[in-house]
Amino acid sequence: MGSHRRIAHSGRDLGTRATVLTVAAAGAAAALGAAPAGAAPQDKPADTKAEVDRLYEQAEQATESFNKADERADRLREDLARTQDEVARGQERINRMRQALGMVAGAQYRSGGLDPSLALMLSSDPDGYLDRASTMDRISARQAGELSDLQDAQRQLAQQRAEAQRKLAELEKSRKAVAQHKRTVETKLAKARRLLNSMAAPERAAYERASRSGERPDLAGAGPASSSRAAAALAAAQSALGKPYIWGANGPSGFDCSGLTQWSYAQAGVGLPRTSQAQRYAGQQVSLSQARPGDLVTYRDDASHIGIYAGNGQVIHAPYPGAPVRYDPVGMMPVSSVTRP
């Protein structure tokens, strides 16, 4: 198979994010249905096809960038939630410490006066109060320890609040990156579809016919998988044959390229990173001549596409929108690496 055609990506079967990406998918669908732009009279079908292939490749690169940014946003959301929880617990601890000290202060006041050390501990600025050297000889060792604990708790709370603010700003920046990558993908998809629609009917039909292959090749004598986990991952990928390519999706109803490999290995109990670039290093590197069923095959120098080796020179992969999960020859495009998770 010469050049490899593909578009990019759109949904995700993950919690609330599914709603967001369903909207994105609707936007991509609208873009794909845009009115065709006529090709220039001098354009040849081969030139148009090559340009469509190039746009699909660029869209897939943008999709992996989208996946990376989206994965980072997920981690930041989790980190922010943990930090906010720590802030809440820290504030509760300080409130309890102040309440306990307040009870002692109240008892002392009723008995004839408030110990200056307690006034210090209940001060809104205990650091400033403590810095007044004249008070130091009026604080017992026990009270000094209690004050130190309160001061430490206040400093820790201030640090946690600052960290929460930093992570919130970082999350907002990451959200903008996700949105930018999504717009890039959708722009490439819309342009590719307009070019396809500009083709003469026979050429367009031939191009799209190639996207509906996927018959099971002869895998007799393909050899054993490298491990039971690899065999299970390959079986999972085979169960996904015919499922649609959806950019940003990692199953089970649709997949992009790295979403398919991540989901397939998850069914085997193996956690892979989200992007094809990260999956490239998620195991032992072997040569293509040593590839065994279940190995990951990445493509192009930037590892922007990935599939699962099925044996007998075939891979299972999610090619591009309009082309469901299917088999294709392993040499469909330049192989950059083979990884055995």
Image (cartoon, rainbow, N blue to C red):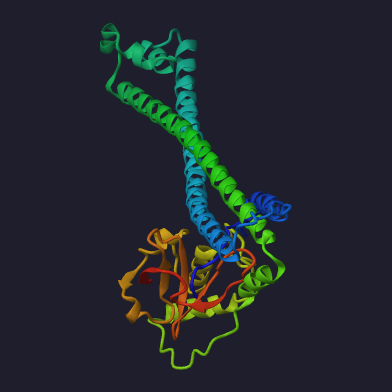
Task: Estimate the x, y position of residue 333 in percent, counting from the top left.
Answer: 45, 70
State whether residue 206 is above or below residue 124: below
State whether residue 247 is above or below residue 265: above
Residue displayed at 69% across by 55% down: 32
Can residue 128 be seen here? The reply is: yes
Q: Quadrant of the C terminus?
A: bottom left
Can residue 89 be seen here? The reply is: no
State whether residue 84 is above or below residue 336: above
Q: Nearer the viewer, residue 272 or 120?
A: 272
Residue displayed at 60% across by 83% down: 215
Task: Estimate the x, y position of residue 322 in percent, counting from the top left.
Answer: 64, 66
Q: Nearer the viewer, residue 150 or 115?
A: 150
Q: How many marks?
A: 0
Q: Nearer the viewer, residue 192 or 184?
A: 192
Task: Estimate the x, y position of residue 163 in percent, counting from the top left.
Answer: 43, 33
Residue displayed at 55% across by 58% down: 51
Q: Residue furthest front?
A: 42
Quadrant of the image occupied by residue 319: bottom right
Task: Estimate the x, y position of residue 146 in percent, counting from the top left.
Answer: 35, 25
Q: Nearer the viewer, residue 319 or 206?
A: 206
State whether residue 269 is above or below residue 217: above
- Left or right relative to 131: residue 251: right
Q: Residue furthest bottom?
A: 221
